[in-house]
Image (spheres, rainbow, N blue to C red):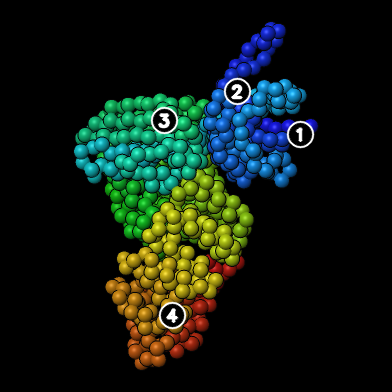
Amino acid sequence: LRVRMGIHSGPVNQVADVNERANIAGAGINIAQRVMNCGDAGHILLSKHVAEDLQHYSEWRPYLHDIGQCEAKHGEVISIVNLYTSELGNPESPRLKRPQSEVRRRRRNALLFAGASLVVLAAIGLLLLPRASARKIDKSIAVLPFQNLSDEKENAFFADGIQDDILTNLSKIGDLKVISRMSVMSYRGDGVRNAREIGKTLGVASLLEGSVRRIGNRVRVSVQLINANNDEHIWAEDYDRDLTDVFAIQTDLAQKIASALQAKLSPNEKARLDRRPTQNSDAYLLYLQAHDYASRMDDIHGAQAKAVPLFEQAIKLDPNFALAYADLSIAQSWLYHSSDPLPAWREKARLNADEALRLQPDLPEGRLALGFSYYYGDRDYERALAEFETARRGLPNEAQAYLAIGSIQRRQGKWDESNANLEKAAALDPKNISILVNLGFSYIALRNFAAADKIIDRAIAMQPNSFETVGLKAMSVAMRGDLELAEKQLSSVGETDSNGVITYMRFWVLILQRRFSEALAIAQKFSGQALRTESTAPAPKSWLTGTAHFLQGDKETAQTEFAQALVVSEKLLNEAPQDPARHAQHGLILAALGRKDEAIAEGKRAVELLPESQDAFDGP
């Protein structure tokens, strides 16, 4: 006997039938019956409501097939989704029509009875059995950017800071799924927000919206918790306090949200929520400004450089501000790793991470900072992984911890484990360009260009004018030999290129196309002395112009340019004598000058500093 099934999740009540026997009834059963009536034999049909819940789970998503609307009993129109796999369900589209006549229903009593039984079982199962899955959906939340209602618009950083601190507090609760800051900041603005669309994009069932008004030392915070599935308000709260009470507001909100979403708080988690990072309101304001810079994705180097002195000022006002020490250390480690591998950054990063943990030994952000110090500063992967794992336990929703773990595993050549952690980071922070770029880099390194394109295109859709995303796309297509498309990608971001990274990439793509005059022109147009590259070694402008002149046959001018490039390169190398990328670049310039033995020595030194056995990703 082939049967059909209709599934809906809705109210179900215990009732007594005409024989005084226990039974169930309610809207959940009625709608499930109507969903079932839209199908043919073998179909497993879901209401749109149930399908949207299942969409949150990647393992279910491939089996859900939207088939439109069906006219049900009393002319009611319902949207239905067909669920089928290679082993169950019916892949054929049902013949959508009105319910059968009463006469035909009598003939098919046996079949309908079997189907109705399945409907009842499905409704009971959805409501009573998989409670863990339902709780998992109910415990996911995104904290959207708060509206700044202060008269002074420069207080926007304060509104963002309050939102971010509430988000951070919620992230410490292991029973919640909390979307990271980077992914929610794109919803900043006064436009109308579509709760259902945002919930679907971010994969959450709840949203927190709010506004902040600051007048002097008085703060008014208004928030509302929204069900993203139906746009209904769960609750709202207003706080009108002194600035010194802002931490009490954040703690109270985190606890109320956890309660509303039925999330369990461990004693350690509750203790962390109750802890105030500083008693000094002026230090806190400086910290919020610094954190705002440190969290920016555009011009990361410049933003981190602006964050450092603000963190330092906050610490000067409160020498016991452990969280500020931790975030300062992370910013310094990033500067050392990404662009300025100067010993001073490395040393300061370690000192500040140690100080954060001396002041507060169980501070998860302190463990994160120490992990980055070991990772970026020492390339001590095992010690870094241990710190990141400790940080992850204290910050279970911190995407950066998963990103860091995945990045180290990539350098260790553990590609599958690395991609799993990078994918986890992307799930917690689905609109974070940096995470997507890292994942794209991994797929390019593995020559999995189809997967890389999918990730990179997703990032470009979010930030179409980002140097980082467009540059990665250009790299991906160039590695497949399509230099014309690569150059077109790089040209699409416009003329603004303050640090030279796009100019550098365009130059080499044009050189590979033998368009030497155009390459020379864009290099000469750059106003600085050295261009940022994809490594920690800035490229002397004269190295590029010399290369173009050499390839055009003007060797005399080329040698003059190479000699100038050597002076710049020596200065860069003296600043960071342990940087393998700068040694490698210095060797190339020496080779161009005909100093063969010295060039080979520099190349060998670069390999000694970073052998492939130590780094499967960046190693030669």
- The vertical placement of 91 against 332, above or below, is above
Residue 253, x across and y down, in percent? 40, 29
| Residue at left offset 41%, top offset 30% | 225
| Image label count | 4
Q: Disc 3 designates what residue? A: 225
Amino acid at the residue labelled 3 = Leu
The label on residue 2 is 1
Disc 4 is placed on an element classified as: helix
Mark 2 / mark 3, whichever is N-terminal: 2
State which quadrant residue 551 falls in: bottom left
Tell me: residue 550, above or below residue 462: below
Residue for badge 2: 30
State the residue position of label 4: 511
Q: Amino acid at mark 2?
A: Asn
Counting from the top left corner in percent of width and height, residue 328 is at 37, 50
- Mark 1, other Cα within 10 Å: few <14 / some 14–19 / many ≥20: few
Amino acid marked by disc 4: Ile
Q: Nearer the viewer, residue 276 or 107?
A: 107
Give yes or no for contact between labels 4 and 3 (Cβ–Cβ under 8 Å).
no
The image quadrant where one finds the N terminus is: top right
Q: Is residue 177 visible?
A: yes
Q: Nearer the viewer, mark 2 or mark 3?
A: 2
Q: Earlier in the sequence, mark 2 or mark 1?
A: 1
Determine whether label 2 and label 4 are within 8 Å by CB.
no
Q: Nearer the viewer, residue 315 or 87?
A: 87
Left or right placement of residue 362 versus residue 316 in this view: right
